[in-house]
Image (tube, rainbow, N blue to C red):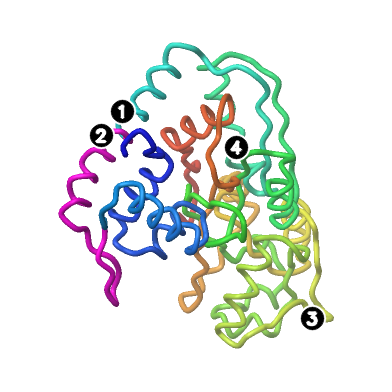
C-alpha cells in the first residue's frame, strides 16, 4: 500500500490539514479546488482509510489523518532541510532574469541586486521593466520566472507573495501655483489638475480605486495629464502642472532636496503592497536564491521630511 504513496499528494494533504479548508489549501497551492479534492480522495484510496471528515465549516482530521500528518510534516521539513543544505554547499549559477514594474525597478530592486551580487558573485542579469499588466503577462508567458509588482492582492494564474508596504502620497512642487497650494482636503482635488500614470499601471489602478471609493474623481479628466513614467510625473509636478500621486519610495531625494512637498490629506489614505509574482510550482537556481535573499534582506527607504 505505502509503496504507491505519492509525495505530491502527501504535501497536498499536509497543506489541507493545516489550512482546515479545501478552498484555503487550493489557494496556497495555486491549484483548483477540484484538483485538491481529487488528490485527497486518491490518497485516501491508496491508504484504504479516510483522512478527513467533511463538515460545513471545512475538514477535520480522522485518527489516521492525525497520524499521517506527523509523517507528512517530517517529510516536508526533511526536504526543506536538504534543499537548504545543498544550496549552502553550492552557490547558484546561471542567468538571473527578473521582471519589475517601473517603481520597483527604479527604487526598490537596485540595492537588493547590489547586495545579492556582492554575496553570490557576478552573473548575467536581465531586468525587464514595464507596467504591472505587461510584467504579469511576461511571468505567465515564461519570459521571466519572477517579478516584483505593486498594488495587487491577486493575479489569475500566478502566485503573489507580499514583500514591502508602500503608500501613494499626494505631492506638489514647493513653489507650486497658488491654486495647487490651496489643496487641503481630498475634496479639493476635484478642482485642480492631477497627473496620472498610463492604463495598465499598478499605481493608476490603486489611485483610481481610492478616488472612486471617495466619489471624488473617476479617472483622468480634460484638465489632467497622463504620463507613462514616474520620473516624468515628478518633472511635471516640479513644473507646477498638477498634483501627482507617487510612491513614498520614489520621492525620497526630492523631499530631502526640498523640491517636492507632501500634501497632508487627513481624509485620504492610499496604502498598497509590493509583491513577488511567479507561476505556481516554485523557482530553482539563481532566481530561487535571489528570492530567498530578497525576502531575508528587504531594503529600507531613506529618511526624509514627511515620513
Query: In this figure, which residue is indicated by the disc labeled 4?
Result: 109
| Residue at mark 4 to residue at mark 3: CA–CA distance | 33 Å
Is residue 20 a member of the stretch shown in magenta? Answer: no
- Name the foreground residue: 92 vs 102: 92
Distance between the alpha carbons at the discs numbered 3 and 2: 59 Å
Residue 85 percent across, percent down from the top left: 38, 18
Q: Which mark is residue 246?
A: none
Residue stretch rendered in magenta on the structure: 52-76
Give the quarter of the image for residue 174. bottom right
Instruction: Please name the residue that numbered disc 3 is placed on.
Output: 221
Image coordinates of residue 152 in percent, x first then y, are 57, 61
| Residue 262 higher or lower than 274, as above or below | below
Q: Nearer the viewer, mark 4 or mark 3?
A: 4
Given contact means CB atoms under 8 Å apart, are the residues at marks 4 and 3 in contact? no
Figure check: 220 above or below 243? below
The label nearer to you, 4 versus 1, is: 1
Helix, strand or loop at mark 3: loop
Nearer-N-terminus badge (1/3): 1
Which element type, helix, strand or loop, lies under badge 2? Answer: helix
Q: Which mark is residue 74?
A: 2
Q: Which residue is mark 1?
A: 78
Q: Quadrant of residue 227?
A: bottom right
Of the numbered discs 4 and 1, the one sitting upstream in the chain is 1
Q: Are marks 1 and 2 in contact (CB under 8 Å)?
A: yes
- Give x and y (percent) for residue 234: 72, 55
Q: Is residue 71 magenta?
A: yes
> Who comes first in sequence, dot 3 or dot 2?
2
Amino acid at each position: 500500500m505505502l509503496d504507491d504513496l505519492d509525495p505530491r499528494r502527501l504535501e497536498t494533504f499536509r497543506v489541507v490539514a493545516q489550512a482546515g479548508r479545501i478552498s484555503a489549501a487550493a489557494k496556497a497551492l495555486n491549484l483548483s479546488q477540484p484538483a485538491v479534492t481529487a488528490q485527497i480522495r486518491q490518497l485516501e484510496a491508496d491508504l484504504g482509510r479516510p483522512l478527513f471528515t467533511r463538515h460545513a465549516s471545512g475538514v477535520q482530521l480522522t485518527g489516521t489523518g492525525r497520524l499521517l500528518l506527523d509523517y507528512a510534516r517530517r517529510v516536508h521539513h526533511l526536504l526543506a532541510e536538504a534543499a537548504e543544505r545543498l544550496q549552502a554547499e553550492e552557490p547558484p549559477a546561471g542567468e538571473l532574469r527578473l521582471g519589475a514594474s517601473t517603481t520597483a525597478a527604479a527604487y526598490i530592486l537596485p540595492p537588493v541586486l547590489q547586495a545579492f551580487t556582492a554575496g553570490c558573485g557576478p552573473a548575467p542579469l536581465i531586468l525587464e521593466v514595464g507596467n504591472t499588466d505587461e510584467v504579469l503577462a511576461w511571468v505567465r508567458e515564461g519570459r521571466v520566472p519572477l517579478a516584483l509588482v505593486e498594488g495587487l492582492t491577486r493575479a489569475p494564474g500566478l502566485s503573489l507573495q507580499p514583500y514591502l508596504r508602500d503608500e501613494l502620497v499626494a505631492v506638489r512642487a514647493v513653489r507650486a501655483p497658488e491654486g495647487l497650494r490651496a489643496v487641503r482636503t481630498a475634496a479639493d482635488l476635484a478642482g485642480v489638475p492631477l497627473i496620472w500614470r498610463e492604463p495598465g499601471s499598478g499605481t493608476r489602478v490603486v489611485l483610481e480605486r481610492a478616488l472612486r471609493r471617495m466619489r471624488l474623481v473617476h479617472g483622468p479628466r480634460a484638465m489632467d495629464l497622463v504620463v507613462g513614467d514616474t520620473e516624468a510625473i515628478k518633472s511635471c509636478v516640479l513644473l507646477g502642472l498638477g498634483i501627482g500621486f507617487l510612491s513614498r519610495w520614489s520621492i525620497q531625494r526630492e523631499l530631502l532636496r526640498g523640491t517636492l512637498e507632501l500634501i497632508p490629506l487627513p481624509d485620504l489614505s492610499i496604502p498598497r503592497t509590493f509583491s513577488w509574482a511567479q507561476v505556481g510550482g516554485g523557482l530553482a537556481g539563481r532566481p530561487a536564491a535571489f528570492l530567498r535573499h530578497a525576502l531575508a534582506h528587504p531594503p529600507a527607504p531613506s529618511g526624509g521630511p514627511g515620513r
